[in-house]
Amino acid sequence: MNGFRIPIGDWVESFVDVITTALGGLFDVISAILGGFYEGVDWLFAAPPFWLVLIVIVALGVWARGWVFGIGTAVGLVLILGMDQWENTMHTISLTLVATIIAVAISIPLGIWMARSQTASAIVRPILDFLQTMPAFVYLIPAIILFSIGAVPGIVATILFAIAPGVRLTELGIREVDKEVVEAGHAFGASPGRILRQIQLPLARPSIMAGVNQVIMLSLSMVVIAGMVGAPGLGKPIVSSFQTIDVGLGFEAGLSVVIVAILLDRLTASLGRPRTHRLLPRARAERVGTADETPATEVPLEPGATVPVES
Amino acid sequence: MPETHAVEASHLFKVFGRRPSDVVRQLQSGATRAEVASSGTAAVIDASFEVARGEIFVVMGLSGSGKSTLIRMLNGLLEPTSGSVRILGTEIAGIPARALRDVRQKSVSMVFQHFALLPHRTVMDNVAYGLEVQGVPLAERRERAAAMVERVGLAGWEDKFPRQLSGGMQQRVGLARALAADTDILLMDEAFSALDPLIRREMQEQLIELQSELNKTIVFITHDLNEAMFLGDRIAVMRDGRIVQVGTPDDILTDPANDYVAQFVQDVDRARVLTASAVMEPARSMVTVSAGPRAALRTMRDLQTSAAFVVGNGRALLGVVRDRDVMRLVKRGERDLTEAIEKDLPQVEKDTRLVDVFESSVESELPVAVVDAAGRLLGAIPRVTLLAALGNVPSNTAELAVVEPPATIPVDVVTEILRGTTDSPDGELATEGGVR
């Protein structure tokens, strides 16, 4: 303890200082873009009357998962409205969407690259580990320095915190595509781009969508924490209830987060699956369809004979 | 202009490991696979062969013998560590990716062990995949794919997904996909190994049938010797990365290059491999129709047999005569043998497999006549020969009585009759000429 100190903290501090002064202009540009993006999305949710937004979200729920989920969505949203957290919730959803869209836009290409190159995988993997295990609050400090307070530092911190599973599951999904099928693509002379588009991405879709789902859930949790740096949304009442020990407000805001989380999770999870739980008439038709999905029994054939068509 | 082979591989090496070229150098200077094992895995060692157009070339070996690695070098899925691969005369080892894709689109397609169908596409779109990659317009590729789907017997299943099909049907889709790409060369990597035995046999037969119509060049990989023998025009046997013998199924079966191959072929179902021409004997009891009844009777007497094949011009098989009928003609002083000829006799073509000779052999006591496509008598297969061939007993030894059926009239009676009727000198001569 006698004077032995590795000043990593100082180094990081001066590093942040250097990039703040050297790349200040760049950060202003990023800040403007992210800010504008957020404003736009937020306008979509916050500007129209609440009932219109409510109807649209419920309709989306019915379309994606069916009537039961639609009714659940309606109940949840009315509850949020009743707790007077509607506006905060809309801000939170907007922040989550913006962060998710950017994180996914970065993580899928990155995951594809890692699946193709061992070197890329070896370099990016530890960085992902670092991003994922660093306590979430720590991102907020440099974010404030670089982007001051408000929505933008929240979005940046959220992207950093939430990106890892998107990258990992994209890489995993593509690596786990049946080697022989990819080989078949090569054997017929398909270009790598065509194989990616027509074979690897479609077959990795469930895994990639699971990654997107994870990114959304992590984004949501981080967006709330970002309330500490002045990001709008449900984080704000939670932070203030923390300061004033307001149990009631804290619970109401917390419950709203839970409702949003369930909504987003179920909605995005259903997008990754084959669409069997849709509107009732279609769902019924699909179920009939699955009945003959059992492998047909082997019909011994004379060579060249035509197979009887299964009706 | 010299005939280019469809596929030509020369001195191919494939080594997996950190310093593959060093390993190749060691192998070239005589090191064994085991000796270089510490520095790399030698999957294929000094493989050279060529495949003629329209040929089915089977590469046979147990797992780990390097056959899958070998086939993947033929379309560049694996780059050879050393050596050359020529496809229709074009070198493909070490050429740029774009040129290689071109070769794959135009010249070489592939069928995979586990089918490797695109699970998210219908049967139709799977079959059309090769054409799609080639850039064939939608309407045309659908039309060509539909024709191929029908050809492999899957008409009516075009809109199903692979998971809705049984294994055998999925592989038909795999086969149709490769055929629809309309390449000269077809690589089949253990294509039927994942199927049930019954379905496998059926697919083998269908492949032979399709091949007779389409006349592709097929390189077929298998670990099943019976399959290799059934399909292959020629077979390369691989062991520990090396090709130990290349030859026709008959060569491999009757003249194995070493103990390993010999041991391998021990269990083969010989009846399905050997062809009639491989086991037939020269037809000894044979007369020309122009020689007349007396010569025929003499031949049968000399050979102690009761029947003889009758051939016309150019050894064209006309039928068979029996000693009793011929004797009747001789007694009547007839000079023409035609009246006694029975046209109904057991006969098979030279490429008939033994398994299909049995029935003919059982139906008649006569040896089965072996004829070529023009109907010329090439030889005969007495029952004894058939048995000897199955038991891998050398059948051309003197101890085995191969003349059958035995004579029904005592020799002295025949001699008496021949003496009792007037001798015609031209008949004598014809007999000498007619009997072999």
Image (tube, coloured by chain):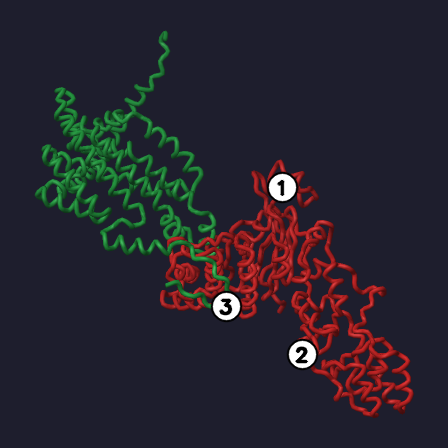
Chain colours: A green, B red
Could you give the CA–CA distance between mark 3 and mark 2, rounded to whole angstroms? 28 Å
As shown in the figure, which amino acid type bears the numbered disc 1? Val
The residue at which mark 2 appears reads as: B374
Could you give the CA–CA distance between mark 2 and mark 1, rounded to whole angstroms? 54 Å
Could you give the CA–CA distance between mark 3 and mark 1, rounded to whole angstroms? 48 Å
Kindly state the secondary structure of the residue where label 3 is placed: loop
Q: Is residue A163 above or below residue B157?
A: above
Taking depth in this image into account, of B407 and A102 the one nearest to the observer is B407
Q: Which mark is residue A213?
A: none
As shown in the figure, which amino acid type bears the numbered disc 2? Ala
Q: Residue furthest top?
A: A2
The residue at which mark 1 appears reads as: B23
The residue at which mark 3 appears reads as: A304
As shown in the figure, which amino acid type bears the numbered disc 3? Gly
Residue at 44% across, 39% down? A118
How would you rate the neighbour count of disc 1 (Cα within 10 Å): few for under 14, some for 14-19, many for 20 or more? many
